[in-house]
Image: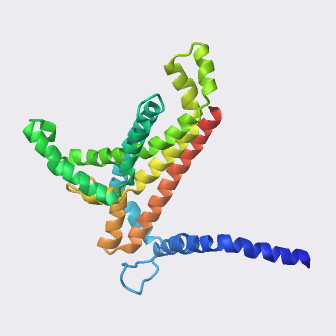
Amino acid sequence: MIGEKGFWNRLRLRLLFTGPTMFAFLTVMIIPFLYGIYLTFTNWDGISVAHTLVGFQNYGSVFADSEFWSSFGLTLKYVLFTVVLTNVLAFLLAYALTKSVKGQNVFRAGFFMPNLVGGIVLGFIWQFIFNNVLVYLGQKASIGIFSASWLAEPGKAFWTLVIVTIWQYAGYMMVIYVAGLTGVPADIQEAASIDGANSWQKLTRMTIPMMVPSFIVCLFLSLQRGFMVYDLNLTLTKGGPFGSTQLVSMHVYQKAFLSRDYGVGQAEAFVLFLLVAVITLLQVYFSKKLEVEA
């Protein structure tokens, strides 16, 4: 009897601490996610109360939607450049700022600050820079590459998204790499120096292999943010010019809410979720395998 009473007491105590969190997680994440999957099998337009089941018709529309796959291909290109360049720059900054640099805390704070600016505000700020500041400087200094706004040229507008993304997230990833670099034991570095290893050998054969966990975290965050970007795409380029910078999240939004084809839009969102989940799981799997080998 005492044991049963103790069990219920422990259960109430756990529910007291975990109950609100579980309730919020179910109501905000799980239930809407499951309801969203249900809507992929309907013809709901996002407004009317009534809707009917249409089976897998929406998924057939997804695979037949060339614009969706075109925007997904553009997003893959965007993710490739932003993930690689962001992490390379972040690692170089972290490596430089873990050395004996005067005012390194000030530099760390300065590089991290862009991450504190929201994507909406960031997009408007850089839109002003590309449309006005750089054009003015380019015309005054006769710099041809900046004589016209990059946002007006389809070939260059894509790179504005890449540049701003790198500028925003490099400082955040730098903090993670700084934590990884400071965790590398100093005695191992000293022993390597005694054995005659130079700086490049210590970096490539000791420091980088011991920082694989940091690389895993940064790659995961970079991939997740790259595929889900929407606010910056909306405010900086609006998907233009002529749809040349419309990433997949913007396409899904327009399909569901502007075209009033919520069932297909929700199906595209679910397909996107599955594709991103597969890519992310593969990244984590191979990164963990590399960590074990290292």
Give the image location of residue 157, x and y in percent: 23, 48
Residue 165 visible, this angle: yes
In the displayed structure image, the side of residue 236 where residue 54 appears, left or right: right
As rendered, which of 158 and 168 lies closer to the eye?
168
Asked if residue 222 is positioned above or below residue 1 in the image, the reply reads above
**175 to 245, vertically: above or below:** above
The count of marks equals: 0
Q: Residue at x 41, y 31 (%)?
A: 102
Could you tell me which residue is drawn at 63 percent across and 25 percent down? 187
Quick check: 275 left or right of 30? left
For this rendering, which residue is in front, 266 or 59?
A: 266
When asked about the image quadrant of residue 260, the answer is bottom left
Q: Position of residue 241 (x, y in %)?
A: 20, 54
Residue 166 on image: x %, y %: 36, 44
Looking at the image, which residue is at 25% across and 54% down? 125
Report whether residue 83 is seen: no
Residue at the top extreme of this rendering: 196
Taking the view exactly as shown, the residue that stands out farthest to the right is: 1
Which of 58/272 is in front?
272
In what quadrant of the picture does the C terminus appear?
top right
Image check: 1 left or right of 284?
Answer: right
Of the 4 image quadrants, the one containing the N terminus is: bottom right
Question: Is 70 on the left or on the right of 216, as rendered?
Answer: left
